[in-house]
Image (cartoon, helix red, strand yellow):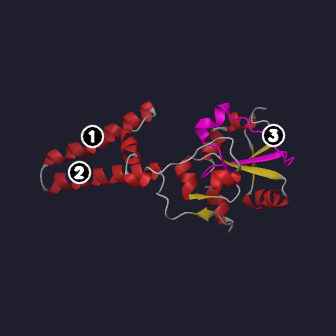
Amino acid sequence: MSGALQEVDAVTAKSWLDQGKARLFDIREADEFHREHISGAQLIPHAKLGGWKPGQDETGTTIAVFHCNSGQRTREAGSQIQSCGYPEVYALKGGLAAWKSAGLTTELNRKAPISLQRQVQITAGSMVVIGLLLAWLVSPWFALLSGFVGAGLIFAGLSNTCALASILALMPYNRREISTTVNSSPEAAAR
């Protein structure tokens, strides 16, 4: 298979799931999944899609629906997703955001920390604003803090590594054990 993934709207996907016609796979990161996910979805992080092959589907399901938060990561992983082994493969149009916009429910764990990506955005943005305020109110040298953060973000984008994310991952609220088992059941993935 080649080309773009076929898309399915949230209401149709929900109908397929309720009828047992489809399996739902969430390709977001484990921290995002544990914060909020669609009931019954199986976690298969985007980074693990390359070597992933589903186990024998005991339900006889022939349709696989993949989703992320907005649909962007699902589109980017299209070729990997199409080779997953299911006869029919779809992307959830608009991802989790469209699912919620359609009034469909999710399982939300407010005790789970927000995703590392959002934590990085909040921390980096705060450091830039603080650096600029201190440069304006105290000393122009504090502008270096904003420059340092900007350089770090550029390096993170170029190298696909983020020192700030690594540091934030060590924070106590982010250190709980998260299972990212690829071939787990939806029930195990939801824990």
Label 2 near label 1: C-beta < 8 Å?
Answer: yes
139 with respect to 61 (left or right): left
143 with respect to 185 (left or right): left
Residue 11 position within the rendered picture, expressed as x and y whole percent measured from the top left:
76, 62
Count neighbours of disc 1 (C-alpha within 10 A) and say few if under 14, some if 14 to 19, many if 20 or more. some
Count neighbours of disc 2 (C-alpha within 10 A) and say few if under 14, some if 14 to 19, many if 20 or more. many
Q: Earlier in the sequence, mark 1 or mark 2?
A: 2
Question: Which residue is painted at 46% across and 34% down in the image?
Answer: 160
Please name the residue that numbered disc 3 is placed on.
56
Residue numbers of the magenta segment: 41-70
Q: Amino acid at mark 2?
A: Gly
Question: Which residue is painted at 41% across and 46% down in the image?
Answer: 169
Count neighbours of disc 3 (C-alpha within 10 A) and say few if under 14, some if 14 to 19, many if 20 or more. few
Please name the residue that numbered disc 2 is placed on.
131
Find the residue positioned furthest to the right.
60
Q: Within the magenta stretch, is there residue 61?
A: yes
Q: Within the magenta stretch, is there residue 54?
A: yes
Q: Earlier in the sequence, mark 1 or mark 3?
A: 3
Q: Which tag is nearer the camera, tag 1 or tag 3?
A: 3
Q: Earlier in the sequence, mark 3 or mark 2?
A: 3
What is the secondary structure assignment of the residue under circle 1?
Answer: helix
Q: Is residue 93 visible?
A: no
Residue 2 position within the rendered picture, expressed as x and y whole percent measured from the top left:
76, 32
What is the secondary structure assignment of the residue under circle 2?
Answer: helix
- Tell me the distance, in whole angstroms, between the alpha carbons under discs 3 and 2: 54 Å
Viewer-proximal residue, 111 or 1?
Answer: 111
What is the secondary structure assignment of the residue under circle 3?
Answer: loop
- Tell me the distance, in whole angstroms, between the alpha carbons under discs 1 and 2: 10 Å
Please name the residue that numbered disc 1 is placed on.
148
